[in-house]
Amino acid sequence: MTVLPTELDGVGRYTVLGEGPPVVVLSNPNADPNWWAAPFISALNQAGYQAVLFVHTGASYEPPDVTRDVLTLVEHVGTGPVRLLGWSQGAAIAQEVALARPDLVVAAALLAPYGRHNRFQRLLQEAWAALDGAEEPLEPVRLALLLLTSFPAQALGDDAVGTLINGAREWTARRASSSSSGSGRPSSSPATRTSWPLWPRSRSPASSLASRRTPTLSLHALER
């Protein structure tokens, strides 16, 4: 049975799957967990948890504003503290939510997370910015960069990579639909950014971790 998403005005849309204590599933603010989270949803449901898939559609995509909107969702769907499952930028969001309101988060699982940017990550930010400012449409380049920075090499070399490509292509198509009219170029508004904005140099999430006691599992892909 297809479960239709529910719209939360000014915040985003969410889909509730299964029954039990809620686990809010987060990814890139522009992305839909439906195209990567299926194995996690199945495992959560089998373990007796309810999966709440969230797609952010709020007016601002700056980290503090997305964090605030996720907290609005948490308070809307939960009868108490929830669990968080975040992937990549969703893990960064989950981290910020747990730091901001530890009283609303029982535990968090962070898949391929990050907070502070090293030199290579800053170079990737510059690459995304160059794509956003390109005179001609460069969606194939954007799609390739998205996949290369989101999945391990083993996943991209597998025959099943078509599912990942199709999901990423749908996302980039939705992103392209928000292009500024007539120019063929992606809008420079925060809502169309491919990557999570840089953390302010004056503050890093790590600086707040010492005082927090939210149980957290952090998983990173390792090349063999």
Image: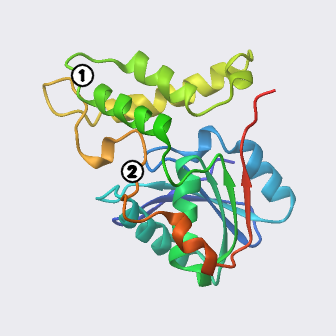
Q: How many marks?
A: 2
Q: Amino acid at mark 1?
A: Ala
Task: Name the residue nearer the viewer: 15 or 80.
Answer: 80
- The numbered disc on residue 68 is none
Rendered location of residue 204, percent (x, y): 47, 63
When the figure is inspected, residue 155 is found, relative to residue 171, above or below; the finding is above
SS type, badge 1: loop
Marks 1 and 2 sit apart, C-alpha to C-alpha, by 21 Å
Task: Name the residue nearer the viewer: 163 or 88.
Answer: 88
Q: Residue at x 46, y 34 (%)?
A: 171
Q: Is residue 4 visible?
A: no
Q: How is the image coloured?
A: rainbow
- Label 2 crowding class (10 Å Cα cut-off): few <14, some 14-19, many 20+? some
Q: Residue at x 24, y 33 (%)?
A: 179
- Label 1 crowding class (10 Å Cα cut-off): few <14, some 14-19, many 20+? few
Q: Residue at x 64, y 25 (%)?
A: 163
- The numbered disc on residue 134 is 1
Rendered location of residue 135, percent (x, y): 19, 19
Q: Amino acid at mark 2?
A: Leu
SS type, badge 2: loop
Q: Is residue 36 visible?
A: yes
- Sequence-first tag of 1 and 2: 1
Rendered location of residue 6, percent (x, y): 49, 61
- Circle 2 residue: 198
